[in-house]
Image: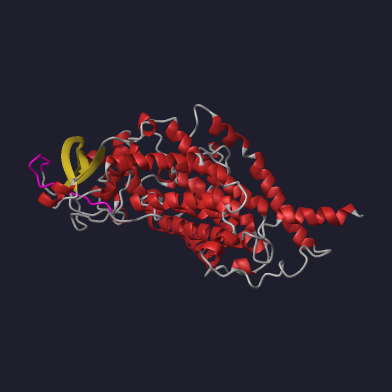
């Protein structure tokens, strides 16, 4: 008996995940949709935050960039026009992938499309400085690179890439769980959610209702979170239908987080990526209306694949195995990090931001302190001057206003405003922001929900702090206010244009 045909047949049976058509479709379209949101966020916000006249201008940052060795297409030249062109290109490629058009062609077409998205967004994120210093930036980059090797409808879904995507979900979930267990005592005594819904960076429209749940339910939330992040991820690697059940638990817990707050595309990324563990047969059993043949134009199911002498098909196999080997080799440091006592959170171990460490909220803030920015037209910035508050799109402001649902869209300025009282208000970008307000800079004001001066320049601006607490049901019935606001202190004295100069 000739062993070569038998080995080739056995190899292809291992390589081809024939029960993962739905997984591939969701992964490719879902990740592409998240890239669309990311490029849209950058198109709308990057020039004002980081552009040529932004708060932290990229041209100045690039002057010392040669020492950082981070890959970016802006290394040689940056302009707002180039940035916008890149974002528009990213939006176009993402939209094509969401529509599934590149997936109908040869295997290398979606590969090139996803690698283009990865390269363009990495170019943006690597010059984004503090405004792009979030864990979901590197998560999106790793997800885009990984799903690039899922191929088109003309080749079977590759099992090695699906397995590595499951490994990504495992690191995302288990890493977050370990950060919590090793973090603040509130996660171990199950009291973390006594505070988190109220103090999270950007509450959503239902966050107050979540906060007002009974404490026994909050303890149950924390216990359920520990199970979902520390136990369930191991079952993602199990054969069907166990893998699909574990993925369903991950998806359900992430949807709970979507309802309770605004975390940009973090939760939606986990939902999309969890489909790597979902089998077609499991889906059809639960949802029989889902069509069984998701790619009717595919030829690999009806003919022997790869056909004898089909060098292009074997090239695809080689490309997938090479990418899988690269990701496996890069997994060593993240694996060690998961087991380390001094575990890193949201850390990249290589300049390409592939196979990263993830995790969030190792400790929970107990009180919500907001930085309130005000301006006045009065010539003397006394306490009895008519101070007017600048209103932000996402961060809490008026006591009676219901927070909006923004995720998966990312409001970068609002997120950094949450970090200010946790670190220091004396950040370079924040002083630049105040000066832009004094100048009534149009691009900066468009980042806000409301300019209290209607485009007119204020004489003075200042920053003060206030404590925000969700109103109880009784307090809401009495006052109609959703937040109880307690003014604290002035943290940046009144600044005029002359001070800025």
Q: Is residue 176 above or below residue 282?
A: above
Instruction: Describe residue 379's horizontal placement relative to residue 357 as left or right.
Output: left
Figure quadrant of the N terminus: bottom right
Q: Which residues are magenta?
A: 380-394
Depth check, front residue: 406 or 296: 296
Instruction: Describe residue 294's horizontal placement relative to residue 359 as left or right.
Output: right
Q: Is residue 437 above or below residue 176?
A: below
Q: Is residue 491 visible?
A: yes
Q: Is residue 459 visible?
A: no
Extreme residue toward the top, this view: 341
Count how many numbered circles sit on residues in the image. Answer: 0
Q: Position of residue 416 (x, y in %)?
A: 34, 43
Instruction: Describe residue 343's horizontal placement relative to residue 45 as left or right.
Output: right
Residue at 65% over, 42% down: 328
Q: Position of residue 30 (x, y in %)?
A: 51, 59
Q: Position of residue 297 (x, y in %)?
A: 65, 73
| Image quadrant where residue 4 sits | bottom right
Depth check, front residue: 136 or 491: 136
Residue at 83% over, 64% down: 308
Q: Position of residue 239 (x, y in %)?
A: 62, 50
Extreme residue toward the left, this view: 384
Q: Is residue 202 above or below residue 22?
A: above
Residue 393: in magenta span: yes
Figure quadrant of the C terminus: top left
Depth check, front residue: 145 or 200: 200
Extreme residue toward the bottom, this view: 297
State whether the magenta stretch is mostly helix, strand or loop: loop
| Image quadrant where residue 185 sits | top left
Residue at 67% over, 50% down: 160
């Amino acid at each position: 008996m000739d062993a070569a045909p038998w080995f080739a047949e056995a190899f292809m049976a291992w390589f081809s995940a024939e029960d993962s058509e739905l997984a591939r479709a969701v992964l490719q379209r879902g990740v592409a949709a998240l890239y669309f949101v990311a490029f849209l966020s950058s198109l709308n916000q990057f020039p004002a935050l980081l552009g040529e006249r932004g708060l932290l201008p990229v041209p100045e940052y690039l002057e010392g960039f040669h020492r950082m060795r981070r890959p970016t297409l802006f290394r040689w030249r940056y302009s707002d026009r180039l940035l916008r062109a890149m974002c528009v290109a990213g939006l176009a490629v993402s939209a094509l992938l969401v529509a599934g058009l590149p997936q109908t062609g040869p295997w290398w077409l979606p590969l090139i499309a996803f690698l283009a998205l990865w390269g363009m967004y990495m170019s943006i994120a690597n010059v984004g400085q503090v405004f792009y210093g979030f864990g979901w930036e590197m998560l999106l980059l790793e997800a885009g690179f990984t799903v690039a090797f899922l191929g088109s409808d003309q080749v079977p879904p590759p099992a090695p890439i699906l397995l590595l995507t499951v490994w990504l979900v495992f690191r995302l979930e288990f890493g977050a769980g370990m950060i919590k267990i090793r973090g603040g005592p509130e996660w171990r005594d199950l009291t973390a959610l006594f505070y988190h819904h109220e103090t999270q960076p950007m509450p959503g429209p239902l966050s107050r209702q979540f906060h007002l749940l009974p404490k026994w339910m909050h303890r149950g939330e924390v216990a359920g979170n520990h199970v979902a992040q520390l136990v369930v991820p191991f079952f993602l690697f199990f054969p069907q239908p166990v893998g699909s059940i574990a993925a369903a638990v991950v998806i359900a817990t992430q949807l709970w987080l979507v309802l309770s707050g605004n975390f940009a595309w973090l939760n939606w990324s986990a939902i999309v990526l969890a489909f790597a563990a979902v089998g077609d047969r499991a889906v059809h059993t639960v949802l029989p209306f889902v069509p069984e043949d998701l790619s009717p134009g595919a030829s690999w199911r009806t003919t022997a694949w790869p056909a004898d002498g089909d060098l292009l098909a074997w090239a695809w196999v080689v490309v997938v195995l090479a990418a899988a080997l690269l990701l496996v080799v890069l997994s060593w440091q993240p694996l060690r990090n998961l087991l380390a006592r001094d575990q890193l959170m949201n850390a990249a171990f290589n300049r390409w931001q592939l196979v990263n460490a993830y995790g969030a909220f190792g400790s929970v803030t107990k009180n919500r302190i907001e930085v309130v920015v005000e301006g006045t037209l009065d010539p003397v910035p006394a306490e009895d001057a008519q101070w007017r508050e600048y209103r932000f799109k996402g961060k809490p402001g008026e006591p009676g206003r219901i927070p909006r649902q923004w995720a998966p869209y990312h409001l970068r300025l609002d997120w950094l405003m949450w970090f200010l009282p946790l670190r220091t208000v004396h950040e370079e970008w924040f002083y630049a922001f105040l000066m832009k307000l004094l100048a009534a800079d149009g691009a900066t004001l468009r980042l806000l929900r409301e300019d209290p001066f209607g485009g007119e320049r204020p004489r003075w601006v200042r920053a003060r702090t206030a404590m925000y607490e969700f109103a109880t049901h009784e307090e809401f019935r009495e006052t109609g206010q959703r937040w109880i606001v307690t003014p604290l202190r002035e943290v940046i004295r009144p600044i005029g244009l002359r001070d800025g100069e």
